[in-house]
Image: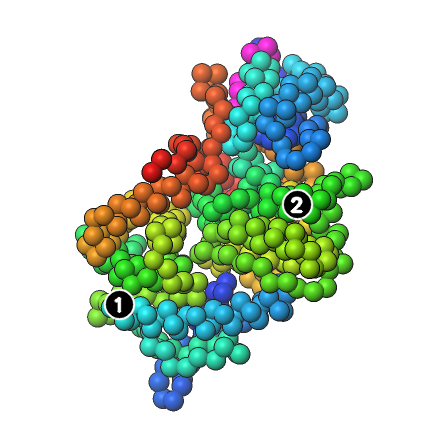
């Protein structure tokens, strides 16, 4: 059963050896040149389970991977039951929201500390399970990097996702995320990445307060 | 003064001035959405890219002629203009200032209100007017911008944009590096498009998508290096380069479409004229049951009509710009603009 048709892949909820699993298929994109398409799909299919595994090593809950087939661009993984943070954010109290975002910040901090860049941090890619765990999914655009630039872009995308989808409380949510992030990464690395985020925002072509980057 | 006439006819006429980059345009549009005139004069650099000061000089010299032509095309006299709109930003300082000066002078001379318009909002609004789109995901690709936007809660939100250079700029610089020149009235990007059509072999190039954001600078460097090495034919390089640039744009547009579930996709900006890009965006629109709308060249490129029309939309919501607040905004972001008229139009 198709449960989500994303831009990148389709997710199916299926029975597999007696358990409910998510089958993630990166379907061929008819708009893309077949050669380019095959290369992108195979590369992302191989890379995603690696990043998911690395995330587990640094204590970030991610789905269990059961099978990987690069030639078919298919991954079979655990079905994580719960609601997306995107759905949940509008349903909970301000206090709960802050608490949830702080925990999300900690998870992002652990990823970054372990050199994992998620690459697509949105509230749709975080699942809150009934037991209250936050599970990160969709590592299809992730990369392994400890560069402050990569970490900055990752958090910048998180911020962007909050402001475009949850503009009402984007500010408080992002602040809470940064608090959680700071607990894991420490003050120095966090300030450094915050400075980077500002620099990235200033890089945007149309920022009213853009100035030359500060001399370092 | 002319308020009696306005009440009696019910329609308003706005004269809009566009001057953000290399085009100086004047458009005249009525509040019924009828485009009465749209005249553009383009500054063509002798070589290289746009020099802002040279472009501004062109605008100052062209202004009088373009204004008169627009009034003749609309067949109205200046005192039949109800207010003046101008593109207040974002764009190149000297160019914007020239347009703003013309607008302020006209507004003072005709004793009519002034409305400052955001150039990016104007591109989306004229696209909606001319294609009939009501609530689209917009992909705006030009030499200065690469933005994926959709309307949410009072503003055009930015879902994705370039992290470094604009896609159109990437294509133009690549073309110049390849020694290509505009041909027989064709812009240099169209020359690349024609060469690409004859390319057969795909050469891998960096494909950089980060969430819904894009990066083109690494791709440009790699493509330029391959040009210099001379191992591949120019046709194959143009073909591969275009395939990668447009696949990246299409991927993020599809992501925004899947995320917002909007009923339409609007493709606009100078690069919208490219057939291959149109084909790709059409495919994803169909896949998501969205209507594909591509803005015709006259209104996809910078033009005065888009400024006039957006001026009308803003004016009808009571938004005008006093002279003392009419300074140009070089980096005025799309999502900073409060656009109260959009909700009304969506309903109607």
Is B113 a magenta residue?
Answer: yes
Residue B295, above or below B238: above
Instruction: Give how far across and how far down residue A6 sits, in percent.
Output: 48, 65
Residue at left offset 71%, top offset 49%: B192
Q: Is residue B226 above or below residue B167?
A: below
Above or below, B348 against A56 in this view is above
Which residue occupies 36% across, 54% down? A147
Look at the image and give the residue range highlighted in magenta: B107-116
Q: Residues within 10 Å of mark 1 (few under 14, many from 20)?
A: some
The numbered dot on residue A58 is: 1
In terms of image quadrants, where is residue B296? top right
Q: Tell me: B208 left or right of B8.
A: left
Marks 2 and 1 belong to one chain: no
* Residue picked out by circle 2: B177
In the displayed structure, does residue B48 sit left or right of residue B3?
A: right
Confirm whether the magenta stretch covers residue B19. no
Label 1: chain letter? A
Q: Position of residue B90 (x, y in %)?
A: 51, 32
Residue drawn at 70 percent across, 38 percent down: B298
């Amino acid at each position: 059963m198709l449960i989500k048709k994303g831009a990148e892949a389709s997710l199916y909820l299926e029975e597999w050896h007696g358990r409910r699993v998510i089958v993630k298929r990166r379907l061929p994109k008819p708009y893309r040149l077949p050669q380019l398409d095959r290369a992108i799909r195979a590369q992302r299919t191989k890379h995603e389970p690696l990043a998911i595994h690395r995330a587990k090593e640094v204590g970030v809950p991610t789905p269990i991977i059961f099978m990987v087939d690069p030639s078919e661009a298919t991954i079979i993984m655990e079905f994580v039951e719960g609601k997306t943070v995107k759905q949940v954010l509008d349903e909970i109290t301000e206090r709960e929201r802050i608490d949830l975002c702080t925990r999300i910040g900690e998870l992002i901090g652990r990823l970054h500390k372990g050199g994992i860049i998620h690459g697509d941090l949105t509230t749709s890619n975080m699942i809150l399970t009934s037991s209250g765990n936050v599970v990160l999914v969709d590592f299809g655009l992730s990369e392994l990097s400890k560069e402050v630039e990569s970490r900055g872009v990752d958090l910048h995308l998180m911020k962007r996702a909050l402001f475009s989808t949850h503009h009402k409380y984007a500010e408080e949510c992002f602040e809470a995320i940064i608090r959680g992030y700071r607990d894991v990464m420490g003050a120095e690395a966090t300030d450094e990445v915050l400075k980077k985020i500002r620099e990235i925002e200033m890089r945007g072509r149309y920022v009213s307060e853009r100035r030359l980057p500060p001399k370092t | 003064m002319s308020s009696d006439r306005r009440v009696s006819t019910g329609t308003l006429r706005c004269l809009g001035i566009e001057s953000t980059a290399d085009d100086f345009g004047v458009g005249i549009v009525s509040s019924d959405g009828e485009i009465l005139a749209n005249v553009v004069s383009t500054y063509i650099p002798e070589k290289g890219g746009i020099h802002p000061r040279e472009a501004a000089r062109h605008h100052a010299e062209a202004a009088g002629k373009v204004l008169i032509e627009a009034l003749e095309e609309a067949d109205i006299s200046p005192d039949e203009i109800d207010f003046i709109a101008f593109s207040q930003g974002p764009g190149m300082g000297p160019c914007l200032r020239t347009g703003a000066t013309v607008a302020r002078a006209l507004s003072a001379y005709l004793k009519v209100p002034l409305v400052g318009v955001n150039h990016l909002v104007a591109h989306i609004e004229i696209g909606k007017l001319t294609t009939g789109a009501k609530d689209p995901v917009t992909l705006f690709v030009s030499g200065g911008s690469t933005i994926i936007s959709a309307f949410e809660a009072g503003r055009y939100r930015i879902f994705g944009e370039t992290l470094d250079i604009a896609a159109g700029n990437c294509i133009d610089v690549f073309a110049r590096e390849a020694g290509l020149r505009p041909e027989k009235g064709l812009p240099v990007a169209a020359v690349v498009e024609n060469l690409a059509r004859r390319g057969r072999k795909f050469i891998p190039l960096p494909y950089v998508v980060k969430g819904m954001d894009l990066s083109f600078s690494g791709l440009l460097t790699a493509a330029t290096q391959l040009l210099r090495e001379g191992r591949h034919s120019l046709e194959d390089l143009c073909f591969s380069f275009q395939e990668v640039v447009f696949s990246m744009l299409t991927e993020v547009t599809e992501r925004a479409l899947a995320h917002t579930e909007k009923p339409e996709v609007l493709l606009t900006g100078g690069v919208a004229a490219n057939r291959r890009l149109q084909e790709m965006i059409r495919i994803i629109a169909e896949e998501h049951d969205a209507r594909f709308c591509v803005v015709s060249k006259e209104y996809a490129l910078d033009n005065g009509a888009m400024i006039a029309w957006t001026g009308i939309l803003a004016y009808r919501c009571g938004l005008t710009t006093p002279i003392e607040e009419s300074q140009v905004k070089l980096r005025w972001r799309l999502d900073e603009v409060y656009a109260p008229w959009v909700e009304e139009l969506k309903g109607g």
